Amino acid sequence: MIELSRDITFGQYINNGSQVARMDPRTKLLCAILLIILFSFLSSFLAFLVCLLFCALLQWNSRIPTGYVLRSFKPFLGFLVFIFCIEVLFYTSATQNKTLLWHWAFLNVSWEGIIRSALTIVRVLFLYYITSMLLFATSLVDLTDGMEALLSPLQKIGIPANAFVMVLVIAFKFVPIFVTEVERLMKAQAARGVRFDQGNFIQRTRKIAPLLVPLFISGFKRAETLSVAMEARCYGGRPGWRRSKRRKLSFDRYDALALGLTLALCVVTVVINFVSPV
Amino acid sequence: MLFELKNVSHIYMRGTPFATESLRGLSLSIPQGQTTALVGPTKAGKSTVVDMLAGLIKPASGTLLFEGDDVFAPSFDIERIRSSVGVVFQSPEAQIFEETVGKDVSFGPRRKKVPLAESRRLVKESLEAVGLDYEDFRSRYTYALSGGQKRRVAIAGVLALQPKVIVFDEPSAGLDPRGRRELLELITRLKQQQNLSIVYVSSGLDDVISLADTIYVLDRGRLAFHGTPREILAHADELAALDIALPEAAQIAVTLRETLPNIRTDVLNLDELETEIVRNVTIEAQSTIDKAG
């Protein structure tokens, strides 16, 4: 049946008042950036195991149902499997000390290839987890404030960081709106005899295509309304104007703890990474 | 019975932190050839019922019978419900997705692979049934239509499917008084001419009091009470508690209760109100005379 919004969960803020949700957005962003760098750098399963513990702690503290978070992984699992297979088959080692398990023409399956590719998949999963966690636990207002605060040095040297942040935030905001819109259009078509749940992949895709034109039109309409609304509230830079903030961001004990833990995790895992390379 | 809902419950976004319960054990029946109204404040679950009647969503628990058959039984062909139930959704813009009026109205017949001549006839008849000129409107762009016209085109698109039932989800929202009157006349006419069953969903009683045979009042996913329009109006205080706006005549009667405590609130129109006021004033005058005498 038609309930798209149930499957598309990426980036929906869950306001459950947990400590993670109430954290200072600057700290949250900093931690997220640190973790993203860390996950991209690590190349040891043991280190990732420690990260897993950290994520479990984060998950528990955020009070977001684990099943819900895990379900958001589902849509792209197939894609990951595909990537994994390609990586394994085309793996070429720099040092050439491969233990070949299977070989045909230019395709190889080697033990190192499997380990390397598995590591990549684990890395992607962790990266996905941490970004979706950031979005689950941060409201859009918080996210904007945090990003603006972190990017304010750029503003001083003449890069319009605030405008970039606004663009990003609007893009995020429109995702659930578009999902609802598609749902509405699908319902309207289903009520007039279109069956979205029938047919093979190509037939289904062809049924989606007619949704695009009305979707774009409503998207443009919304954009227009939004720009008028922003203009009406004097958004935009005029010389000498500065946007003030109603809410002051505050860095308190929990933030310090979170940042400290993240840094500790970085140090520990990097050390593990050097000590045990796999 | 056309539709029967038995103890139906539904939760939106089940299994997510956003889960909201929209129906909790609702039972109601919609008879053939009549106008049934579903009335309730926001979050009463009206739109959920609409989606269910259109066969678009499946209830989490409970059964939905269509002409006596369980809709969600594996043997039931959902096509049957889709071809006999037409839905005019809450905002007509949502329903129109083709560029021109002609293409949009003919969408249903084309889907069903109706022959071209037949489809053209259906489009012509449907457009004329809603009071739009076929030659004038069929090549017009849907985005350039006015709100009232869009609503008519949406209804025409549904009529072209030749349904047995049409479900209207708050069709008069956002229309001016004249547009509303015209729409209600149109619905009454369609019902008589095409022998349709009508399900009319509304947040206020204004539209449905003259239109409906039976009114179901919903509240937070449950049935509050039901009956004929007159029986519903007798519940004036409960309706006020649910934030459901009374029709003009009944509202005046409720206000007059301060001076005429025995006045009945189940007046359908201003004429009935007049009779009721005259009756009460006469009784009041009589009792004053009796006391004095």
Image (cartoon, coloured by chain):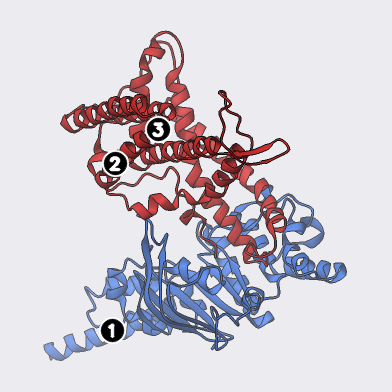
Category of crowding for the residue at label 3, using alpha-carbon neighbours closer than 10 angstroms: few (below 14), some (14–19), many (at least 20): many
Q: Position of residue B262 (x, y in %)?
A: 24, 83
Q: Is residue A110 above or below residue B226?
A: above
The colour applied to the residues of chain A in this rendering is: red
- Per the model, the C-alpha gap separating discs 3 and 2 is 15 Å
Residue under label 3: A44
Q: Quadrant of the C terminus of chain A?
A: top left
The colour applied to the residues of chain B in this rendering is: blue
Q: Chain of mark 3?
A: A
Q: Name the residue rendered at 65%, 56% in the picture.
A: B96
- Per the model, the C-alpha gap separating discs 1 and 3 is 89 Å
Q: Quadrant of residue B132?
A: bottom right
Q: Is residue A220 visible?
A: no
Q: Position of residue B200 (x, y in %)?
A: 51, 73
Residue under label 2: A53
Which numbered tag is attached to residue B280? 1
Q: Earlier in the sequence, mark 3 or mark 2?
A: 3
